Image: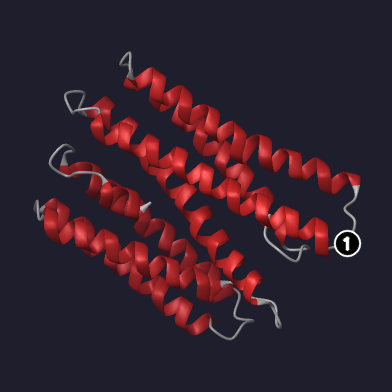
Amino acid sequence: MALAMGITPSRLVTSGYYRVHLWVLMGLNTLASLALFSNRSYDHWPVAFALAIGLTMASYVGAVAWLYEKSSAGTAILYGIALVSLVAAVLATNWRSGTSAVGLTLGFLDIASGGWLLGVTLAAMFLGHWYLNTPTMELVPLQRLVILMAIAVAIRTLVSATGLGLNLVYGQPPETTWWIFIGLRWLSGLLGTAMLALMTWYVLKVPNTQSATGILYAGVILSFIGELTSQLLSVETLYPV
């Protein structure tokens, strides 16, 4: 989400968008800090916890920077939050001992692509909502985020398909229930989200930002369902799906 906000051109979007949603990031990082503190069963939790606390503070500082219209500093803080968040997510992951290089690579891509999909979809929805407050803004920033959303779905699909294929080759024969949840993961989190991104793109050609925002709300819900299902399935599989 921080990366998507940083990519959004500040000359075309009012500073309130960045300030308000850095508060959202501050809340999310506070929640992450509490979650990490309550689960101290793996080696790297102190570092991940410290990074989460630092990200919470950085989100507040970034919001202050945008409050005073310091767009360069605010954008740099957003990029820094995005990078450190990725490092913290990798450290907070409970990697299986003896995981192969392929498994580690796919696991890293799973974290990065999943975060990208959820983050850019949330950022697009929030930006669509911001057009209701400032309807005179140009549509280019929102269109750019919708394109990034579609790219994120494509990359996420590639990562998930690779993990699914490897699990079918090297894992245990899946049961019927497993296939049902795989169907939910693909229909909701990938195909459904891709369809809503396409619908949003065409609605913005009308243009109707209010309807586009409603579609993006649905996109956030579907992507969350898909990613939660993926997380639940990946606990019991050799490779993330």
Residue 3: where, in percent of width, then height? 33, 54
Q: Which residue is at a point 28% across and 33% down the rendered structure image?
A: 130
Q: Which residue is at a point 45% across and 52% down the rendered structure image?
A: 116
Residue 104: where, in percent of width, then height? 61, 72
In the rendered view, would you say 215 is above or below 106?
above
- Counting the numbered discs, the total is 1
Task: Kindly identify the amino acid type of the residue bearing the numbered disc 1.
Answer: Gln
Secondary structure, mark 1, is loop
The answer to whether any part of residue 166 appears in the image is: yes
Where the C terminus falls, by quadrant? bottom right
Residue 97: where, in percent of width, then height? 70, 82
In the rendered view, would you say 8 is above or below 56?
above
Residue 75, quarter of the rendered image: bottom left
Residue 63, quarter of the rendered image: bottom left
Q: Which residue is mark 1?
A: 172
The answer to whether any part of residue 211 appears in the image is: no
Q: Nearer the viewer, residue 50 or 148?
A: 148
Tell whether 78 sits left or right of 69.
right
In the rendered view, would you say 124 is above or below 111?
above
In the rendered view, would you say 116 is above or below 193?
below
Label 1 environment density (alpha carbons within 10 Å; few <14, some 14–19, many ≥20): few
Q: Which residue is at a point 41% across and 79% down the rendered structure image?
A: 50
Q: Residue furthest top?
A: 206
Residue 129: where, in percent of width, then height? 33, 31
Q: Which residue is at a point 83% across and 63% down the rendered structure image?
A: 171
